[in-house]
Amino acid sequence: MTVRNAILGLLAQQPRHGYELRAAFEALVGGADMWDVKPAQIYTTLARLEEAGLVSRDSVEQDGGPEKLVYSLTPAGHDELAGWFRAGVATEHQRDEFFVKLMVSLYSGEADPYQVIRAQRNRLYQDLHDLTARRNGVDGRRELAQIFLLDKSIMHLEADLRWLDLLEARLDDIRRQPLPQPQVRPRGRPRKS
Amino acid sequence: MTVRNAILGLLAQQPRHGYELRAAFEALVGGADMWDVKPAQIYTTLARLEEAGLVSRDSVEQDGGPEKLVYSLTPAGHDELAGWFRAGVATEHQRDEFFVKLMVSLYSGEADPYQVIRAQRNRLYQDLHDLTARRNGVDGRRELAQIFLLDKSIMHLEADLRWLDLLEARLDDIRRQPLPQPQVRPRGRPRKS
DNA sequence: GGTGCCATGTAACGCGTTACATGATTAT
DNA sequence: ATAATCATGTAACGCGTTACATGGCACC
C-alpha cells in the first residue's frame, strides 16, 4: 500500500517512467540504505495501477535509445491520492514476532523465556548503538529523510528496551504463582459439556 | 513467518489438527481481539510445512464425526524450531506509511505537511486513549498476553507522539531556509556529465 | 573488453487477506 | 427449524521478495 501511494504522489508531481520512479522513491526516503525498493515491485505495482485506471501509460521514443514507458496520473488517480491524504494512517497492530516467541517459550517448554528475553535485549542494545552512531554521522540539514527515520527507529528501540524490562518484572511476579494457562474461549454460544 | 513458527511451537507441545491450532494460537496471543488468524492461513501454512517436511499429517477417524487431520512435528521441524529460538528476532525496518505520506506531501505539494502531522497526532491520541482504557479493564494475572501486547502498543504510541513533536520542530527549522531537494544519487561509479 | 549504469520486465514464491464452499453435531 | 460451533478446505488476489533475462550506452 505504501509504495503504491507513494508512486501516485510522485506521478502527481510529474509523469515519470519506472526506473525514474524507483530513484525518486529512494531519494524521498533517504536512499537505498533506508528503504530498498526492488524494480519488480515498481513495475508490478505500475501494472496494477494501470489496470485499476489510476495511471495511464505513454510510450516515448528517444533518439538513440530504447523507448521509455512514461506513466502519468489519471483523474481517478488524483482522487485516490487525495483520499490517501485525507485518511489517517491506521496504527498497524503489532504482529510482534518476539512476543509470539516469548509466549511459545512460556507454554511449550522448548526454550527458557528469560534466555529469550536476554538474547533480544542484547540485540536491541546492539541495534541502538549502531543506529545512534549512524545518526550522528548524518547532516541533518541535507538528509532530512534519513534523520526522520533514524529518530523514529531509535525512539522505538528505546521503547522496546523499556518494554523488555517490564516483561521481565511481570514474569518475576507470576513466577511466585502458578502460571495461568491461556484460556481457549469459543466465540459463539456456549455448549453444554 | 511468525504464524509459521508459532505453529511449530504449538505442535512441539502436542500433535494438533488445524482448527485446534487456530484456537491455541489465539489463546496464546490473548484472544481474537488481539490477533485474528484466518483459517485459510492456518491450513495453507500447514500445507507448506508438510511440503517442506517439517510436519507430518495423520488422519484420525472419530466415532460419529468427520475425520480429523492431525499434524505432528518431524525431527526436521524440531530443528527448525530450535533454530528459531536460537536466532534473535531481527528489528524489522520501519516501512512507515505515515513517514512516506509526510515526505510526499513535502515534495509534491499535494497536501500541507503540517495538516498531515496534525491529523496523525489526533489519531494517535485517540488510539492511546482507547488502548489505555482497554488495558485498565484487563486482569493482569489472568490475561498475561493481552497485558504484554497492550503495554507494548502503548509505549510505541507514546514514542510516535514524541516523534511527531520532533518532526514538527525540525520542519519549523528548515522553514527558515530553502527546502533541500532530495538527492538522486546513483549507486555505482559516477559518469561524466 | 569489462564494469556499471539506464531501462525494461517475467516467473515463482511466501505471507496474508477476503470470499466462498461443504458437511456434521448440538442446543434452543 | 435455526443458529452456532466443529472441522475441513479452495480460489483469487495484494504486497513484497529473490532470481532471472535482455539490450544499449558510456567510460576506462
Image (tube, coloured by chain):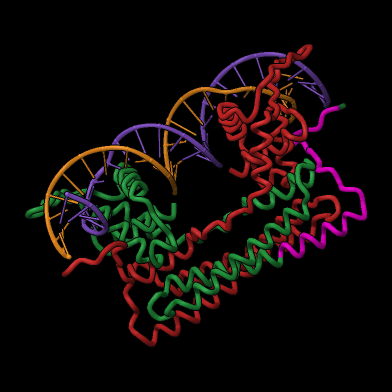
Chain colours: A green, B red, C purple, D orange
Give the quadrant of residue B82: top right
The mark tally for this picture is: 0
- Identify the residue at image location x=33%, y=47%: A49
Q: Is residue A191 magenta?
A: yes
In magenta stretch: residue A82? no
Q: Is residue A6 left or right of residue B44?
A: left
Q: What x and y, as percent, mark residue B133?
A: 74, 61
Instruction: Pinpoint residue A139: horizontal percent, then vertical percent.
Output: 42, 79
- Viewer-nearest residue: A165 or A69: A165
What residue is rendered at 38% in x and 60% in y?
A82
Q: Which residues are magenta?
A: A163-192
Compared across the picture, whether B62 is left or right of B193 comes to right
Position of residue C20 in the picture relative to residue B23 (left or right): left
* Identity of the residue drawn at 65% across and 33% down: B77
Q: Can you say whether B164 is above or below A87 in the image?
A: below
**What is the x, y in percent for residue A168?**
79, 60
* Pick the front one: B81 or B39: B81
